[in-house]
């Protein structure tokens, strides 16, 4: 099956370059919503069937395969079975952690994380958060989820100003997502993480796939790398919840299932000599 065609000239050039010189290519992916479907309880997340075997096969053809996630790196590795993928690098907490070959390298989190950990439960209660709201402690950050609430969007808007004020007091930033707001350290994002990966691997082309607002800095990094002469293509694992991401991508696929199909098409193309 032929590869789908990106809707932008830059994306088309990026995908063509990726295919023609895979040994110098970097393929990087978000985890939740991209490799794995979004679920009510993130602790039960798992990649879409066929994704990990596809990444394993891709690793045999391209220069580098990576996952860039807001999760702790080791959590993504364990939930995703990513240790099966030869040579994969997993950047957790938006790049603050690096997992490779079974080891995690990370600096200590800033003290503001402990302040949020102490104050967040009482704040959520006092703000009148509805039933179904819950807090996820990620170690280096904390996230407030409303997906289980009767009206998740209204619950999130109710909490947003309270969470923003707490983050400001703690010297952290808020990261909005799909029915979640995360309070995390400043100075790290997926754009900086992807740029560091691309430079560190001497990539000559980049593919990045994501689904949420936190992936937009990575899309921006691909645009900046193009300005440096490194072609790239951005892929959105689309959902109705975050249409803005699809509008910013070169190529749009229908969720993790669509990404699995894209990876299959890409592998077939890499195994077929270019005309």
Image: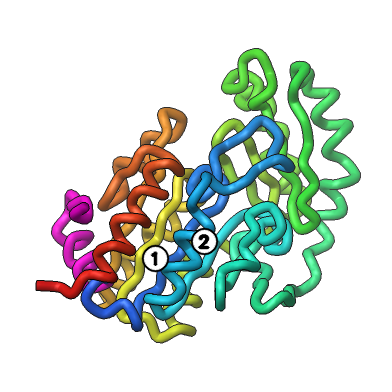
- Residue 99, by quadrant, is bottom right
The span shown in magenta is 1-18
Find residue 201 and report its horizontal and vertical position in percent.
Answer: 45, 83
Residue at image x 33%, y 52%? 262
Quadrant for the C terminus, please.
bottom left
Left or right of residue 78, residue 228 in this image: left
Q: Which mark is residue 190?
A: 2
Find residue 255 and report its horizontal and vertical position in percent.
Answer: 42, 40
**Depth check, front residue: 238 or 111:** 238
Residue at image x 83%, y 38%? 120
Q: Is residue 130 magenta?
A: no
Left or right of residue 88, residue 219 in this image: left
Q: Which residue is mark 1?
A: 221
- Residue 272, by quadrant, is bottom left
Most extreme residue toward the left, as rendered?
275
Q: Residues within 10 Å of mark 1 (few under 14, many from 20)?
A: many
Against 272, residue 162 (above or below) is: above
The count of marks equals: 2
- Among numbered discs 1 and 2, the one appearing first in the sequence: 2
Find residue 213 and report its horizontal and vertical position in percent.
Answer: 48, 45
Residue at image x 61%, y 25%? 157
């Amino acid at each position: 099956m032929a590869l789908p065609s990106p809707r932008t000239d830059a994306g088309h050039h990026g995908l063509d370059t990726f295919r023609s010189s895979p040994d110098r290519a970097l393929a990087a992916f978000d985890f939740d919503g991209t490799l794995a479907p979004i679920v009510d309880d993130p602790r039960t997340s798992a990649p879409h069937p066929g994704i990990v075997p596809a990444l394993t096969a891709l690793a045999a053809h391209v220069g580098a395969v990576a996952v860039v996630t807001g999760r702790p790196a080791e959590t993504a590795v364990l939930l995703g079975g990513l240790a099966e993928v030869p040579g994969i690098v997993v950047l957790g907490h938006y790049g603050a952690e690096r997992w490779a070959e079974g080891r995690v390298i990370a600096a200590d989190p800033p003290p503001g994380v402990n302040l949020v950990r102490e104050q967040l439960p009482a704040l959520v209660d006092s703000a009148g958060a509805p039933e179904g709201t819950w807090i996820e402690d990620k170690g280096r950050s904390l996230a407030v989820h409303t997906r289980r609430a009767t009206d998740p969007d209204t619950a999130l808007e109710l909490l947003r100003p309270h969470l923003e004020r707490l983050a400001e007091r703690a010297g952290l930033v808020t990261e909005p997502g799909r029915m979640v707001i995360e309070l995390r350290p400043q100075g790290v994002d997926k754009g900086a993480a992807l740029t560091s990966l691309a430079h560190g691997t001497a990539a000559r082309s980049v593919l990045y796939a994501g689904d949420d607002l936190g992936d937009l800095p990575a899309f921006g990094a691909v645009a900046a790398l193009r300005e440096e002469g490194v072609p790239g293509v951005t892929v959105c694992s689309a959902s109705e919840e975050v249409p803005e991401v699809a509008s910013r991508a070169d190529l749009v696929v229908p969720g993790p299932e669509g990404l699995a199909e894209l990876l299959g098409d890409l592998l077939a193309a890499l195994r077929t000599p270019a005309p």
